[in-house]
Image (cartoon, rainbow, N blue to C red):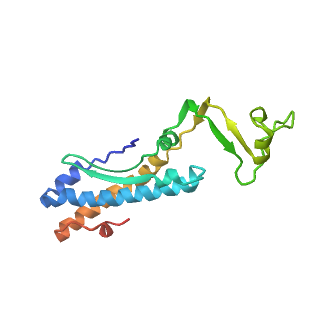
Amino acid sequence: MATERVLNMDEMFKRFAFLGANLPRSAYVAMLVSAKAMLTGVTKKLRGEYLNVRTGHGWQSMADFAKFSEDTMQAGIDSDVIYMRAHEEGFHGRVQVPAHTAQHRHGRTLSMDIKTRTPLRQARMTKRQIARGAWTVRSHAMEMKIRARHFMRDAIDEQYDHTQDRIVRALVIAATTGQIPKPGQVGA
């Protein structure tokens, strides 16, 4: 899952061409700092603003990255958890739910049928399972609709201007000192 914003830095890089090998390295330091800032922004969004966090597995799976090659430089955030893509981009379709045993959490009551005042799924429960608060759910297909939340895109968009500023700051430091700046010098 990748969301991308492109910075056009060609003119600036031409002005700082005298830095030679320090030019891409200095810009890379700025991209590393921006990637960390993007990760911080997305974890804040996931903890409260965008998702109803239960386990924290989704936001803990988020990782920042910075890549550097001869002609491109990238910084961003990514997740290896499959369902985070559905939350970012949205999803509407049928999914297969495997058979499993469900049970009540934290002493909550069963969902009741309003008309009959009986617990839902009672046909699949035995008396012993009802007393214990557990029941078996058969394998079935379920219609699922998740709205797009764009937490990654929003975090990247918030850092877009800051990334340009960090790159300029890194190049100015490299030009004045003749050395590659450290991440603390570029700023967070």
Q: Nearer the viewer, residue 188 or 112?
A: 112
Give the x, y percent position of residue 5: 36, 45
Considering the image in quadrants, where does the C terminus appear? bottom left
Q: Residue at x 34, y 53 (%)?
A: 65
Give the farthest residue toward the right: 116
Give the x, y percent position of residue 123: 77, 32
Q: Nearer the viewer, residue 58 or 121?
A: 121
Residue 81 in the image: above or below residue 92: below
Give the x, y percent position of residue 151: 49, 48
Res 30 quadrant in image:
bottom left
Residue 29 in the image: above or below residue 73: below
Considering the image in quadrants, where does the N terminus appear? top left
Q: Residue at x 25, y 57 (%)?
A: 27
**Left or right: 95, with 69 as reference point:** right
Q: Residue at x 20, y 53 (%)?
A: 13
Q: Nearer the viewer, residue 77 or 27?
A: 77
Residue 43 in the image: above or below residue 136: below
**Left or right: 123, with 3 as reference point:** right
Instruction: Give the total of numbered labels.
Output: 0
**Left or right: 115, with 174 as reference point:** right
Res 4 quadrant in image:
top left
Give the farthest residue toward the front: 128
Give the x, y percent position of residue 131: 80, 46
Q: Nearer the viewer, residue 144 or 20?
A: 144
Res 170 quadrant in image:
bottom left
